[in-house]
Amino acid sequence: MNDSDLEALLRVARRVSRGEALSSDLMGQEGVGVALRLVLAVVALTAADQPVTKSAILAAAPAARSATYRDHATLLEDAKELLPALVRAELGLVDVRVSVSDLADQLQAAYAAIRVERARREKVEMELEHVVSYARELHWKLKAEREEDLRERERKVRHIRPVPSVNPHNDS
């Protein structure tokens, strides 16, 4: 970005302030580069408390979608990820409160935490299933031995039964 980009942007600003509609054609006629359009769009979206997405940036830029994705993909991604924090910091200097972009960032962080926790849960469930499977196999393997031990004990143990008592005074 150089002085001529800023001068071009100021020419567009003059024309818009006189009532012209902001359009891709107007930006192109005045020579405002796509990079500056993207940066300005992110700043506008963040300041307007709107979600900062690639499609919203391209709609606000205005810029050709396919050419921007092809020629400025890295800038578009970096602007989407990094500039909202800078704009919020600048707005914080003038005491602006929580914005939609703050909430969107918090939501994205929550989604990331949920993904991490789901992955941890799946890993633990797999480990638990492995342990359960091992315990089940061990049970079936030892079941025959345990039953044989019980049968052997049954053969060795002599069961005692009560004998009816004999009454010596009974003469029957």
Image (tube, rainbow, N blue to C red):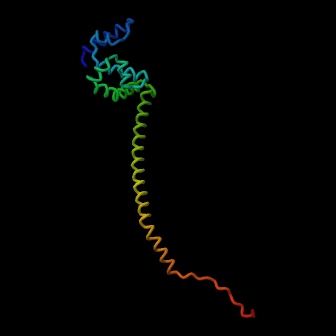
Q: Residue furthest front?
A: 172
Q: In this view, does 68 lie above or below 159?
A: above
Going 64% across and 85% down the picture, which residue do you hit? 163
Q: Relative to 113, is 30 on the left or the right?
A: left
Reply above or below: 128 against 41: below
- Image quadrant where residue 84 sits: top left
Residue lying farthest to the top in this orientation? 18
**Does 70 sit left or right of 96 as displayed?**
left
Q: Position of residue 73 (x, y in %)?
A: 28, 26
Q: Where is residue 102 in the image (x, y as percent from the top left)?
A: 42, 30
Residue 140, above or below 65: below
Count of labels in the image: 0
Quarter of the image containing the C terminus?
bottom right
Quarter location, residue 53: top left
Q: Which of these two is toward me, 60 or 167?
A: 167
Indicate the position of residue 24 as horizontal and vertical percent values: 33, 13
Q: Nearer the viewer, residue 69 or 159?
A: 159
Q: In which quarter of the image is the N terminus?
A: top left
Q: In this view, does 82 lie to the left or right of 149?
A: left
- Residue at position x 37%, y 18% in the image: 60
Q: Which residue is drawn at 43% across and 57% down?
A: 132
Give the x, y percent position of residue 23: 35, 12
Residue at point 37% right, 19% down? 59
Q: Is residue 159 left or right of residue 114?
A: right
